[in-house]
Amino acid sequence: MTDFFLYVTVVLLVFFGLSAVLFKRNLIKIVIALNILEAGVNLFFIVLAYRPEGTAPIFTLAPELEKLRMVLPTPQALILTNIVIGFATTALMLVFAVFIYRNNGTLDIRNLKGVEDHD
Amino acid sequence: MTEHLPVLIIAVPLLAAFVLPIVRILGVIPRDIFVFSVFIAVNVMLMSLIPDICIYNKTLHYVLGAASPSTLTPEGLAFPIRIVLKIDGFSLLMAVFSAIVGLVGFLYSHKFVPEDGRKNYYVILLLLMLVGMIGLEFTNDLFNFFVFLEILSISCAALVAFRTNQKHPPYAGYKYLLVSSLATSFFLLGVGLCYAQYGSFNMDYINRMLNHSLLDRVALVFMIIPLAMKAGAVPMHMWVADTYSEAPAPVTAMLVTASQASLYGVFRLSFTLFGNSTANISINYHTLGWIIIILGVLSMFIGVTMALVQHDVKRLMAFHSVSQTGYMLLGVGVGIAVYAGHDGGAAFHQYGKLAMTGGIFHIINNSMYKGLLFLTAGVMVRRFGTANLDRMIGMAHRDVFTTIAFIVGALAIAGIPPFSGFASKLIIFESVYHFNPFLSVIAMFVSVLTLASFLKVFYGAFLGPERKDLLVDNNPLPHGMTAGMGIMCLFILIMGIAPEAVIKYLIDPAIAGLVKIL
């Protein structure tokens, strides 16, 4: 049952993240929304790997073979990679936001609309 | 040594990118020689794989971290556990052309990008872009595919926004990164759905185990649509014009190849991951093919009509790349639609395979002539200080070589013989006609419109009286820029004059890598 609620959380996080990306007008808020979406994806992988009452996947600490119930390590390792990638993306997008603000004096995409048309 | 080539091709530019700040201490010229030799080395290593893969039709596997790189499954296990690089005809074809465009981009940037202390970062990012493209094309592991996709999009975005002191580029970079990270997040969700069912990231293994459940179809959507978005197919094309027009010219030429790397992903996943030539499948290949065809036709038509009304030369060309993407999607889409039909592959043999030949041939042609056109646009912008076509005139008096290069590129994109675009477009028209004549008519119509809008550019910017007062830069072109455009022209001519050889030695092995019912 906990599994079910965790998956619902994943769907909600992705949904909220996506809708905020689509409807927010501030460049910084869009970055935050993207982070929420990424958190949803990360949680999805962690939930996939989770086994209720499982132990860490280290054989020296493992109980005897009949009761063996381990958490899957691969998705966790992968999500570590994804968190780092997400960090890089966030940092780069915030840097762009700083430059946009410096050059155009606004972070609102409605005011940035005119930026696309050249003279 | 030769058995380690697949990983060296990815590792050499990656390590070179991180060693570069140290090499820079020695000076600018040693750095340029170093980077140039890295690009040449990657090209040579890729070319040396051509005989094995394309002539003898082998598929190279490289298992990272195994005792011997060729042991695919570890002892006593029935499934692969390590990261596998797999090189077949299609991956090699895409990688070779990515590397050539990378080399051209570097040569062109030699004097094009000023030596102001930030050039270092520029070169590092170029190398990382090459790593992203080649890695994405070589890997047989879904998660690895995702990682290389992210390397590619982060380095592309940073390069697009390279001129940070101007108004537009940071916004274009932001847009590109937003689109890519949205796309890759959903792609990862799709990968997760596959992993949840099959417990592996290996494409071949998943393909063997695939049970075509509803979850698989959801995963297919989550993986194909983001990649089509990154390739710039029509409903998701809004970022293309901004990104392509704001990036420095050599970067735009490489961005075209980067988009095609995503297109590679679309085709690779539809065939290698979800493709199954046996008849009792539940993923409807006909529907998938039609979805890709409709994306393609929309891209073709909307791209070219948007291009016709542009006054900004780089935006005009950017919309043309949307339109050209449509041709590739159309060609390969027809191939997918008749693949695994209930007629035992008869339709596929009759025209489906030919349509795929045209589509894949068009991919490599496009990376050449579109790159060339963006490079000539770079010269125009350099001369006149603006991308506005209304303020350009009489370039043919001054830059004869650029004019010839532009004519070659424009005729190739419009599909005029003897240039390369003609060969691939003719194949697409012919084979698509057997599938559905109406699609073929649209494709020809779009081709005419393409020629019309390039005539506009040629007439506006190159012909007319010489106006010295409009020029902001009257220096002769640096040799690097000329060399870059020259290489592209050479490839366009070779592929236009000898399309049969190209199809036989490069395209047919690529199709053999994708399709299993030959």
Image (spheres, grey):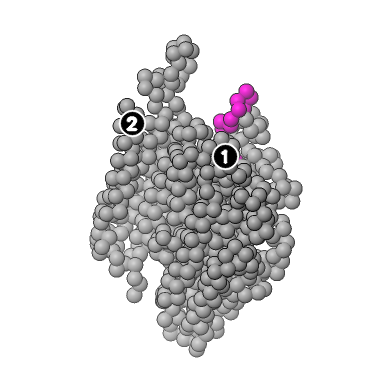
- Residue bounds of the magenta highlight: B74-85
B38 versus A112 height, above or below: above
Please report the residue visible at 42 percent of the width from the left and 41 percent of the height from the top. Answer: B189
The three-letter amino acid code for the residue at tag 2 is Phe
Locate the N terminus of chain B and report the quarter of the image it occupies.
top right
A81 versus B420 height, above or below: above
Give me the disc on residue B207.
Answer: 1
Q: Residues within 10 Å of mark 1 (few under 14, many from 20)?
A: some
Q: Answer with left or right where residue A57 lies relative to residue A30.
A: right
User: Main SS type for the magenta part?
Assistant: loop
Label 2 residue SS: helix
Please report the residue visible at 71 percent of the width from the left and 56 percent of the height from the top. Answer: B505
A24 inside magenta stretch: no
Give me the disc on residue B82.
Answer: none
Q: Is residue B41 visible?
A: no
Rendered location of residue B54, percent (x, y): 71, 51
Please report the residue visible at 48 percent of the width from the left and 16 percent of the height from the top. Answer: A59
Chain identity of mark 2: A
Label 1 residue SS: helix
Of B220 and A16, the residue lying toward us: B220
Which residue has dot 2 on it?
A4
Outermost residue, top side: A64
The three-letter amino acid code for the residue at tag 1 is Asn
Q: Is residue A9 visible?
A: yes
Residue B430 is drawn in which quadrant? bottom right
Q: CA distance from mark 2 to mark 1?
A: 28 Å
Rendered location of residue B150, percent (x, y): 45, 47
Residue B502 is drawn in which quadrant? bottom right
Chain identity of mark 1: B
Rendered location of residue B89, percent (x, y): 66, 50
Q: Residues within 10 Å of mark 2 (few under 14, many from 20)?
A: few
